[in-house]
Image: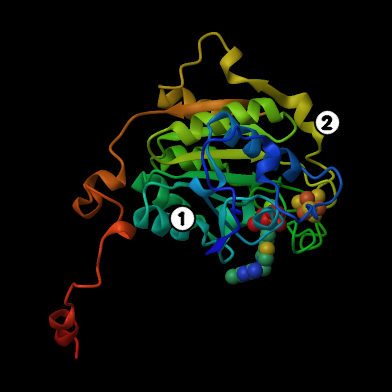
Amino acid sequence: MVDNSSKKLKSEYDLVPGDFNTSRRPTWCTGCGNFGIWNALKKTFVRMSLYPHQVLIVYGIGCSGNGANFLKTYSFHALHGRTLPVATGARLSNHKLTVIAEGGDGDGVGIGGNHFIHTCRRNINITYIMHDNRVYGLTTGQASPTSDRGFKTRSTPDGVLENPVEPLTLALASGATFVARGFSGDVNHLTDIFQKAIKHRGFSFIDVLQPCVTFNKQNTYDFYRQGIYKLEEEKNYNCGNIEMAFRKSLEVGRLPVGVFYQTDKPIYEDGLKQIERKPLVDHIISEIDISKLLNRYS
Ligand SMILES: Cc1ncc(C[n+]2csc(CCOP(=O)(O)OP(=O)(O)O)c2C)c(N)n1
Ligand code: SF4
Ligand SMILES: [Mg+2]
């Protein structure tokens, strides 16, 4: 695990977004939607007075994962598709940390789809941000599981033949207790959603519509701006009602953003006696004799 949280560990000073910059400047393409997510996260930490050393972000492999170099918190650059198991392990080892996982749509519902389902139903207290650009960005433009049917890419020159996965519907069906969608072109709204997600006690999932200006010329800023509307402005929408959430997640033609669903359920950590009093990392293990246990396997 890389500690890039700098020497500023005292918690008395007032945070500004720049406190979360590293010495590296982002290498994302000009106009990439990842900038919006990066800025929204920094604003969220400032609003919540979360200091760099209080946050761990586990990244997948992808353009989104390159954020590990540009955002100053504890960070761990995991394998492609393995962000959630690593984040789960870290949270169970130290549940005093705010743990966030970030990865692409390929990472989350392609190679890591299995982990996604089981992390939702486990209801572990972490936040998962999916940078959903509906394409494989880092590997230069192949179709992803959220690509539109018919989308022409380097791997699908005649157009995608499959129907896309809808991450929100999958999260709801898998038992996630906080399910939201944001747009990286609206940083303030995204900041509000991130704040609610991190505050939520349990697994929070945000599918972020993130334009890839280089390899996805279909799902552009204009495309999203024309289709998006805010759920909180819908008079009769109740985010405690899972049937409504399912229906909204499957809406065709328009794109609701905001919190689709939130409910309160016991979290995974509640069942672990070992961490009731203090995090695992604070247990003193140097004097514990494990030779008996080891002998059983020799
Ligand atoms: C186990 C494994 N399989 C495949 C790859 C190659 N690979 C790296 S990134 C990537 C896809 C990235 O797409 P996505 O997760 O959507 O992230 P994006 O770059 O779009 O942010 C793939 C297939 C890898 N690094 N590791
Ligand atoms: S390839 Fe796409 S996702 Fe990757 S940095 Fe460029 S615009 Fe962003
Ligand atoms: Mg992607």
Left or right for 210, reference 262: right
The one nearer the camera, 41 or 127, is 41
Mark 2 and mark 1: Cα distance apart in space:
34 Å
The one nearer the camera, 141 or 183, is 183
Q: Residue 136, position in %: x, y?
A: 72, 57
Residue under the point 39% across and 43% down: 125
Residue under the point 59% across and 53% down: 7
Q: Label for residue 271?
A: none
Looking at the image, is 147 positioned above or below residue 81?
Answer: above
**Residue 159 visible to the viewer:** no
Residue under the point 47% across and 22% down: 244
Circle 2 packing at 10 Å, graded few (<14), some (14-19), many (20+), is: few
Looking at the image, is 72 positioned above or below residue 225?
Answer: below
Q: What element carries label 1?
A: helix
Residue 294, located in which quarter of the rendered image? bottom left
Quadrant location of ligand 1? Answer: bottom right
Q: Residue 280, position in %: x, y?
A: 30, 58
Left or right for 265, reference 31: left
Mark 1 — residue? 87
Circle 1: residue type: Ala
Extreme residue in the top direction? 235
Mark 2 — residue? 222
